[in-house]
Amino acid sequence: MRTCPHGVEDGGEAAVLDDLDPLVGALRERGFAVVGPVARDGVIRFAELGSAADLPRGLADEQAPGFYRLHERGELVFGFAASPDAVKRYTHPPRSVLFRMRGGVPEKVPPRAGKVALLGVRACDLAALAVQDRVFLGGRHPDEAYRERREALFLIAVTCAAPGGTCFCASMGTGPRPTSGFDVALTELTGPHRFLAEAGSERGAELLAALPSRPAGDADRAAAREVGAAAARMGRRVDLDGVRERLIERRESPLWDEIASRCLTCAACTMVCPTCFCVTVEDGVDLADGTAERAERWDSCFTLGFSELGGAPLRSSGAARYRQWLSHKFSTWVDQFGTYGCVGCGRCVTWCPAGIDITEELERLR
């Protein structure tokens, strides 16, 4: 994939799709499991689609610190902000078997990845995927399982038309309009309802060429630019000026203890975070079939045992663990990877049961 050089901003090639059923069907014919947003148990989740009719048309979300609700509103198919599911669930699954033994003989672990087309990926998640690519594929020891899953993905991005009350991707420079890292990008338009589609890769262009469509006109492009202006309606923002240095200087601030008095150290923020990648390794034995396996599963720097060394945790207090997490995202991550570890999706704010708002805490550290 590459950066899309011919978007609606510069009058490049774009097509208009009247509905998404042909797109879903064409991907299924090419052997992809098509995964997209669906409404389930009162929340938007990612699940395999049978057709475009499974998409949550006419649903919008309301997000605030520690708060999430779905409502019926309008006719948009993608009229909601980031869901708790990020792309990392498909590149870095919650649990994966590393190897298995039966009677002391190693067995081949089943294939890790089938072809998956993710429909409805947001710009913030594409930015998070770029961060994870650097973590898992950069350096001297790339993760081959990650590479296999990553190469099995076909990414269909969507411009955010309705950013949530906890979003701040605009101030992180990651959204709301996808500009790179996708195969196809969609912008949903109304009056009449339609989708402006742009290719971001050769296989994306090949797919679009096979779909019933018409060339985008000036009115379609103007409408798409208006959707992209959703950044002005973003619910939160972060002032990045000096944030890295400020976190270093305020290491001993009493604010960390105050935050810890509210933080449950439940790790919900790290589970929904699209860039968090910490894992632990566990071994298990099945006495029924005589197999033993070693598996990798998500862990969190908020758990007491994560930093255990020599029988005791290095970060025994909640204050130390929250400081570690926030400092890593906005300070030491910059030293490690040359970018921030936060993409501004706002998931950690919405899904924190205590309603702790990372944007407010950074502002209080001034």
Image (spheres, rainbow, N blue to C red):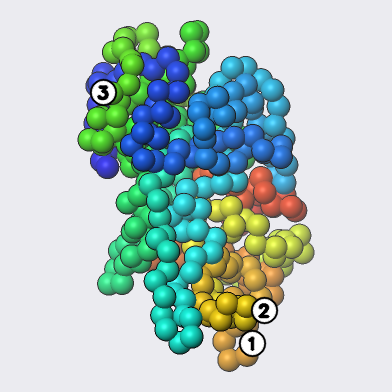
Task: Give the residue number, with chain letter if any, for mark 2.
Answer: 316
- Determine the residue positioned at 66% across, 45% down: 350
Q: Are marks 1 and 2 in contact (CB under 8 Å)?
A: yes
Crowd rating for badge 2 (residues with CA inside 10 Å; few <14, some 14–19, many 20+) = some
From the viewer's side, name the closer residue of 131 and 147.
147
- Name the amino acid, label 2: Ser
- Determine the residue positioned at 42% across, 68% down: 109
- Name the amino acid, label 1: Ala
Classify residue 33 by image quadrant: top left
Task: Give the residue number, with chain letter if any, for mark 3.
Answer: 209
As drawn, the label of residue 212 is none
Residue 35, percent from left and from top: 49, 40
From the viewer's side, name the closer residue of 285 and 213.
285
Q: Are marks 3 and 1 in contact (CB under 8 Å)?
A: no
SS assignment at label 3: helix
> Is 156 left or right of 169, judged from the image as shown?
left
Task: Give the residue number, with chain letter if any, for mark 1.
Answer: 312
Classify residue 107 by image quadrant: bottom left
> Can you say whether 12 is above or below 3 in the image?
above
Crowd rating for badge 1 (residues with CA inside 10 Å; few <14, some 14–19, many 20+) = few
SS assignment at label 1: strand
Q: Are marks 3 and 2 in contact (CB under 8 Å)?
A: no
Dot 3 or dot 2, earlier in sequence: 3
Of discs 1 and 2, which sits in the foreground?
1
SS assignment at label 2: loop
> Can you say whether 225 is above or below 306 in the image?
above
From the viewer's side, name the closer residue of 351 and 293.
293
Mark 1 vs mark 2, CA separation in Å: 8 Å
- Determine the residue positioned at 69% across, 75% down: 317
